[in-house]
Image (cartoon, grey):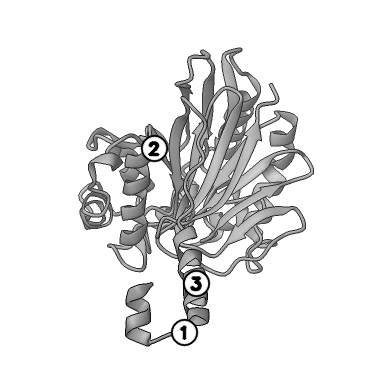
Amino acid sequence: MVFLQSIFKVTPKVTLILLLFHGTFAQQKSSLDLPAKASHFIVFGDWGRFGDDHQVQVANQMAKTAREVHVDFFINVGDNFYPKGVASTQDPHWKYSLEEIYKDFSLQKEWYSILGNHDYMGDPDAQVAYTKISQRWVMPARYFQKTLGLRDGSGKKMKFTFIDTNPLIPEFYSNPEYGPNVRTQDTTAQKAWIKEQITQLDPSVGWNLVVGHHPMYTGSLTRREGYDTKRIRNSLGQLFIDAQVDAYISGHDHSLQHIKTKGGIDHFISGSASEATQVDKLDYSLFAAKAYGFLLFSATSTDIVIHAIDHTGNVLYRTVLKNKR
């Protein structure tokens, strides 16, 4: 403050104002409030742009957060490569949108990945095949499940059901870009598989989580009643309620959101890892932000703490899910 006084020749009254102003900026970098012995994972989506827009800035902050909390793994909710996916496992996108951007050591953990609609404009199976090439990219099929143990010593596990929402949208079948690839999947078989995965749980499963690209609900004015949003909601909404899914995690909307529906399911959207677009709130929205960033999940057998973090490290939101099992 002495420095500021000497430069601007301010009065004591103005000095007080500057101190308050300075303090406001100092408080913007909120610290993370994390549970002890938690398993940490970062959720992000809609990102691969050869480093354009804010992809690099978000990647750098992901690395900082991953180092700070010792992230165990990452969940990538689709639209991995813009504008039209990848053509093969040798596509330049792999180097210039993935490997050269997310190169920090802290980002070299497993990336459990799913497909978005932009990925269907290229060769979605090339992304599946990249699993055998990469040390971190995990997409063993267009849809799959993974059960991971918690680090808190409880013996409980998190079950993730990774789904492919693209073939669940009828309008895609007549689309000249999406159609050829969605028609290669048996939608009836996937829906039967989803029902089995989320309803037949081992007693050790403490958290029943589903990951898909398209949200069921969003505050975005352009997408809240969009055909894709309504199709996923109508196709899976009641099934998730009946199965008592703890949370549905998605992307597609380029924002960060938390929505809790009347059915008791928490919906999280994390689709702004490179681009952020305008978002509004629904009546049952708990949080919505037009912000470049990602979500950090910290899970124990009793709670999951979720932080929304922007590309500068600001904590925009914090909430806690309580285990009801």
| Residue 82 image offset from top left, x and y in percent | 37, 61
Q: Residues within 10 Å of mark 1 (few under 14, many from 20)?
A: few
Residue 323: quarter of image: top right
Q: Residues within 10 Å of mark 3 (few under 14, many from 20)?
A: few
- Dot 2 falls on a residue whose secondary structure is helix
Task: Tell me what residue is drawn at x 70 percent, y 28 percent.
Answer: 243
Q: Left of 88 or right of it: where is 185? A: right
Would residue 85 be seen by someone viewing this image from the given angle? no
Q: Which residue is mark 1?
A: 11
- Dot 3 falls on a residue whose secondary structure is helix
Task: Tell me what residue is drawn at x 62 percent, y 38 percent.
Answer: 320
Q: Left of 185 or right of it: where is 92? A: left
Which numbered circle lies on residue 266? Answer: none
For the residue pair 25 and 156, the one nearer the viewer reads as 25
Q: What amino acid does circle 1 point to? A: Thr
Q: Which residue is mark 2?
A: 69
| Residue 282 image offset from top left, x and y in percent | 73, 59
